[in-house]
Amino acid sequence: MVSIPYLENADLGPLADAATSWKVLPAKYESLQSEFEKRVLNQLKGHWEGEAAEAAFATMAKVRTEYENAAIEAGRIGKLLQDAHTEFAAVQKQLHALLDEARDNKYKVYDDGRVEDSDPRQDSPTASGTPGLAEERQDKLDSLVNRLTRVLERATAADEAASAALQRDVNGESSSFNTRVYTSLDAVEVDQASALMKKKGRLTDAEVTKLNLLLSANKNDPEFSRDFAVKVGAGNVLDKYNELIAPPAGTTLSKVELAQLKELKANLGTTIGTATTSDDHRKGGPDPAITKFQDELLAAGRREFNANSVEPSNGLNGYQLTSSLMSDGKWDTNFLQDYGDGLITAERNGANVGQNPDTYWGSSRSLGTTNIGALDPMAGYMDALGHNPEASTEFFTSATTVNGEKVDHYDYLMEDRHWPEGAGYTGDSKNLSGYNNLGHALESAVTGHSYDSTPSANTPAHNEKQAALMEKVVQSISKDDGLAHDGMRDSLGRMAGEYMPDIHQALTNDQSGNKDPFYPVSGSRAELTEQDTSRFLMTVGQDPDGYAAINLGESAYTSNLIDYHLQHPGAFEGSTETAMREIARSSGEVQGSIAIGRRDSDIGNGVEADKAYNDAMGRAGSYASGIVGTGIGVGTSFIATPAVGAGVGGLATTVTGDLINQMVEGTQRDTLGDTVYSSGADWENAKNSTSAVLRDAYQQSAEAQGKSHAADYGNILANEVEQGFQSADSNRDGYNQDKSGTGQG
């Protein structure tokens, strides 16, 4: 692999000069050809006859052709060298930027790409007094290593491709000029990668390494991915992938070989996903070649792929192989709709003959010794939806007709389907059912961004379909808390965090009939009832990650909301004090509801539960920082007008970001003696922490705006939080009676 010093210090000037020199050669060869014709051929024609003349003219015709071929070859080499220079210059620029970033952040980068933290704070006796420092530094280090590796992979792939192209002799030992010289590195790398995928027989370790390098360097390149997919073909992609992840009986793979195959799974999945979306970048509409590839991939779902003739049971179904690849990358929206229809049809047809998903997908099949992939194809498909919000929203708000029966996608996957359990079905020993993947898909569907990314200033406001689906999720879990399965509550918590305006509106005491002045919502609003919302929050609060996402999301929202109303007193017809009271009361009801959930959780003893919840708050810190980074706390749903957005964007981010950081640090210290913020280890701590967040948000915002008497609101806000907690507590008894049929409603 290309080393850092080589790439960092490489002088690309000679390569640019060479490209320029080769690019001007075609004109010179064309000039020589013209002179040859004028001074030799044309002079001799009509003046020389006989056998000697015929032989000479035949030779001269070849010379004329050689001039033409020389011009073509020179031009193509010039284009290849120019492409190589552009690629090397781009990766060199990226490397320099990364090295500067590393030095600025006190990281040492070694020649082989290793990165070491050289921040003196790590060795300081007071380092332990800076909660989150070690985790923050490690996250930055990991990010640097990943990005450096990516740059070096691109450089290595380009270096090897350029070398192979320039040494290529398609004419064999012939001394003729080569008119089939590559003109781009992409073309070289496509041919190299496709040749490996179509090779007969199992790839060697060196070949798997080479394939990984090529795919990793180009997996997000639409042109490369498109040409690779078309050249290999859908059937060959699945054949080779199945062959690699299911070696012949008796084969023992080393840890390194297994790691290579897992890396290949991710690289191949991302590459094929990029290929399916490649015509999004194409002028003139859909690409017929990609349409054909997608059709072949859909048809392959019905095929059985036997890894070898000795143990045919190791072979997987086409849906299982494709869904395994779908866990990575972003796949085309329309393709995902067609694929989901086909997958549900296949599964429901199996159920119609008495097979549940366990039997249908697990019968006579296994993952073999590598345990790569998943027997339940719905798991990988859910993650594909989780990476494509548009496709996910569309899928969960539509249905498939199977044998004349309409199968609503949401109802089937959320309520009716039996999700097989076991690491073999999910491909993940830490996730024994596909509910985690289902949560990913739902999170993407209602938030408008992929499940593994945080909202940003570019995240659009919730649309009508997203809001309606969120209503359905809240209602479903309110009616049956068993639908909030282990593994998906972290996603449910983040979903709630990004619908905090809608949740606060559901819990408000405002009787004016117009809730927007209190809790402005841009786009469509999820129409939630207080009963459904309370039950939902209490259920999700039983999970540490669900609790943490709601806690931090709600705190970020109300902190920004306080700042908003202080900056825009005219947004609400009543007094500022009334607005502050209402915000604090509804905040108390939200925080009280999840505190009830935490109190009702069955995680274990107090110490064990505290650790689980505090650890979750630390994990949710990056999520909360993401929504704070938008300047509004909860995606874009808070901004009512561009003017409001501009007003909120500055101060609120500073105030709220500081509070969120202190909350995360407070849970890591884990005692109210060290900080006023707590993850709510008990009912009183939860109330105190909620009051402290609101008080400090008000005080910091008021002081920044030069308002006096900020301290007067401390008791006012605390009293309203108390009322909110009491409402949550009474809701628990009243709404649970309604649920069991012993009360009204």
Image (cartoon, grey):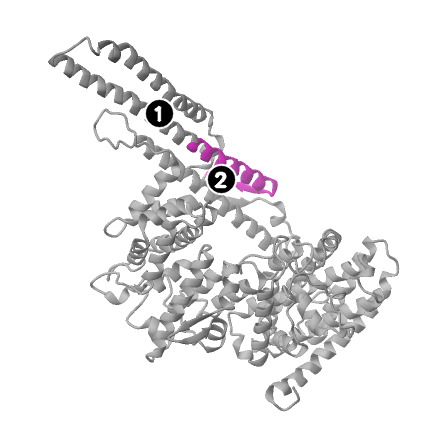
Residue 587, located in which quarter of the rendered image?
bottom right
Give the label on residue 637, or none: none
Residue 261: x and y in percent read 35, 54
Is the magenta region chiefly helix, strand or loop? helix
Residue 657: x and y in percent read 69, 56
Q: Nearer the viewer, residue 688 or 707?
A: 707
Question: What residue range appears in magenta?
Answer: 83-111
Q: Residue at x 47, y 46 (%)?
A: 281
Q: Which element is circle 1 on?
A: helix
Q: Categorize mark 1 by other alpha carbons within 10 Å: few (<14), some (14-19), many (20+).
A: many
Of tags 1 and 2, which is closer to the observer?
A: 1
**Residue furthest bottom in the image:** 742
79 is higher (above) or lower (below) than 420: above
**Magenta run includes residue 107:** yes
Q: Amino acid type of disc 2?
A: Tyr
Residue 669: x and y in percent read 66, 63
Give the label on residue 74, or none: 1
Circle 2 residue = 110
Q: Position of 425 compared to 114: left or right?
A: left
Quarter that holds the C terminus: bottom right
- Gap in angstroms between the C-alphas marked 1 and 2: 40 Å
Residue 68: x and y in percent read 30, 23
